[in-house]
Amino acid sequence: MTRRSAQHTSFVLERRFAAPPARMFKAWADPTVKQRWSDCHADGGTTEYSMDFRPGGREVHRATLPNGKLQLIEKTFLEIVPDARIIFAYGIEADGRALSASLVTAEFHADGPGTRLKLTEQLAYLDGHMDLDERIRGTGEGLDRLAQELAAPGQ
Amino acid sequence: MRLETPSKRMDRLFVALADGSRRAMINQLSAGPASVSDLARPLKIALPSALKHLAVLESGGIVRSKKAGRIRTYHIAPDAFSGLEAWVAKRKAMWNRQFDALAKYLEEDDA
């Protein structure tokens, strides 16, 4: 039934933050701070969360999604350079089925008093798992976000 | 297999989706095929402008049409939205949402 496939792509997000690299790094490295901004606790359905922030350490997040699916996001930290760079691999599973596997490089560059964050995600999208509704919604979310970003500065 | 590059396809999607009426048509068509008048009615637009929007969507490869007798029905092209692109859009949205929260946290913490 399932056609096995792996499609590869990558994307880069860059963003400037007012805080210096050391504070940015702490926001990623300290589990209590990270919970303040990461998605891990945003949706409420979290059943398990842990983070072991060191090379080889893992971050595990299990949640029950609004659609009833059990989601597992499992991350392994590969390289950590304090205040400068974090590299990690992560996979997303729904109901035990692997959806994608990624390599993420987050780079913190000093930019005046603040930080320019460059996030590169290289990913393998597995077995074409999304149905049409989900795809349309996914694309729409991306476009809405883009529209907000384009509208924001001038207003 | 598709030969077109993902970014070309994305450009095409962006143009087609950059209009509220066309997005509404896609929403309606994702529930099932519809005729031009079915699609024009909820938007309260004239048939010629509905046809214009549908032509953009069709040339963008997002919808297809077929004619049975005098009636032309439109449906979503099965490969209109590549799963990979939608997945990437979702991942980007996820990161940007988190970055918004991170920026807010850093500002609050500063005060």
Image (tube, coloured by chain):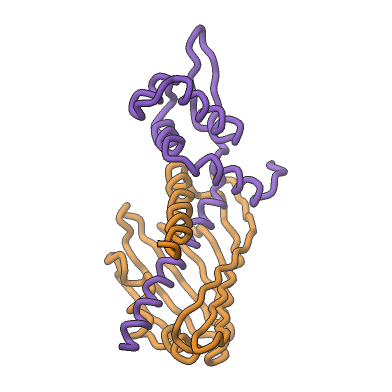
Chain colours: A orange, B purple
- Farthest top residue? B69
Near-viewer residue (A45 or A155): A155
- Farthest left residue? A44
Across the whole image, how many numbered discs are drawn on residues? Answer: 0
Residue visible at 44% across and 39% down?
Answer: B23
Q: Is residue B78 above or below residue B69?
A: below
Side (left or right) of B92 relative to B8: left
Residue visible at 42% across and 40% down?
Answer: B20
Residue visible at 49% across and 75% down?
Answer: A75
Near-viewer residue (B98 or A130): B98
Residue visible at 41% across and 21% down?
Answer: B46
Give percent across and percent down for residue A49: 35, 76
Side (left or right) of B66 relative to B94: right
Side (left or right) of A89 relative to A68: right
Residue A19 is drawn in which quadrant? bottom left
Q: Is residue A150 above or below residue B62?
A: below
Image quadrant holding the N terminus of chain A, namely: top right
Q: Is residue B53 above or below residue A3?
A: above
Give percent across and percent down for residue A129: 51, 49
Image quadrant holding the C terminus of chain A, namely: bottom left
Near-viewer residue (A141 or A104): A141
Give percent across and percent down for residue A25: 48, 87
- Farthest right residue? B3
